[in-house]
Amino acid sequence: MKRSHSILFGLIGLLGIATASAAGCNATGGSRTFGGGGEGGDDGSGNGSGNGTQQSSSTTDGVGGSFAGVGGSGSGGGTGSNCQTDFNVDDDGDGLTEAAGDCNDCDANVSPGSIEVLKDPNDPMAQDSDEDCDGTIDNLPPASCDDNLALDNAEPQNGARAIDLCQFTTPADKTWGVLDAKYVRANGQNAAYGPNIGILSNFGPNVNPQGGTRVLGLSSGHARLPSQAGSCGMLTCYTTGAGTAPNGFPQDVPSCPGETEINDDIGLDVRIRSPRNATGYKFNFKFYSFEYPEWLCMSYNDQFIALVTPPPMGSINGNISFDKMTNPVSVNVAFFDVCPGCPLGTGELSGTGFDSWDDAGGTGWLATQAPIKGGEEFSIRFAIWDTGDQAWDSTALVDGFQWIANGGTVAVGTEPIPDPK
């Protein structure tokens, strides 16, 4: 198909994301009794009543919460209890009993399959807690696991590490983490490693990792900077050829012509088991394209997706990265703000090739979040492709994966990450 010029200006509004709050508690003693109780009966057989509250770790971002107890009744000379557990019964519904290693069967946020949660230093009622029941409080996963990974490291497990998925597990293990990682085409078929994949220490002097020391680059051309071996050297490089899009894609943009053909598609597919206390997850990404500005609102607009299986509520055909108007990530997304005359200017194009091989543009760093059930196994396929032809390449950066374990409800959504400057 031959391209014709048509330029569309005017981008669409931004998207807000719901925040969440948390719940949790600490255990004491063999009987696991929580909350303040009432006074006992005079003769040792009477009942007492009372109220109490047990607080535990609390935070604003992914680490903890609080548990509020309601008074119970006690007999004899004792006090009432809010939570008395059976050693062989899963009293808190987190899938594990005390006999199976749950060190606090009064709190579904605490079990061997949970992720550790930092206490909120601004909450005077917050208490330290051992969410993963390993006997150590707040032993968090490593903050970085991608140090010294080479640009052309071909192992897909290291692609997962580049986006800060640092813990790996097995189907038989009860802990959370990455179960499998592989490079794939857009439809999930295995793909060979090539220069369309890169583990980058930066993307030019003004774009740095969001976590650890590396970011994952996926490109419909070459995921390389001009100074690196294997660089494309121009706005179009051919890689995987004709591909098959996932069902529902390429996603049409309202009022823009559509196209079904995709080319030069590549992705990373990671299968993960979530922590038992997780309610969601989030990751950061950035999108660049030579399609800007000549091919705005045309059938050639390359797309990036984060395809989740099973699809969470609020996703579009399983994709969780789009703007408030449900536009997919392309040159038509509302967040396309890095370009001449755009809100974020051209600094983040510097040294990338998108500043020198042709006029181009991109987004700032964006954050996508989505809900998850604790202990659920799911997959995310980060994929990019050329739409309509193989020309005018695009590149996506993915980084900064984090679990959300602060309770409450997490909704699918994407929003810009504020500039810390």
Image: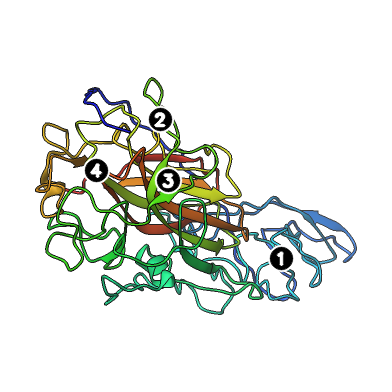
Assign a secondary structure to mark 4: loop
Mark 2, mark 1: which one is toward the viewer? 2
Query: For the residue marked with disc 1, what is the amino acid?
Result: Thr
Q: Give the CA separation, mark 2 to mark 1.
A: 47 Å
Asked if residue 316 lies left or right of residue 242, the reply is right
Q: Where residue 384 sits in the image (x, y, percent)?
A: 38, 49
Mark 4, mark 2: which one is toward the viewer? 4
Q: Residues within 10 Å of mark 4 (few under 14, many from 20)?
A: many
Q: Where residue 317 sits in the image (x, y, percent)?
A: 54, 39
Q: Residues within 10 Å of mark 2 (few under 14, many from 20)?
A: some
Q: Which residue is mark 2?
A: 324
Mark 4, mark 3: which one is toward the viewer? 4
Q: Give the CA separation, mark 4 to mark 1.
A: 64 Å
Res 91 → quadrant = bottom right
Q: Which residue is mark 3?
A: 305
Q: Which residue is mark 1?
A: 33
Q: Give the CA separation, mark 4 to mark 3.
A: 18 Å
Res 5 → quadrant = top left
- Name the residue at the front extreme: 1
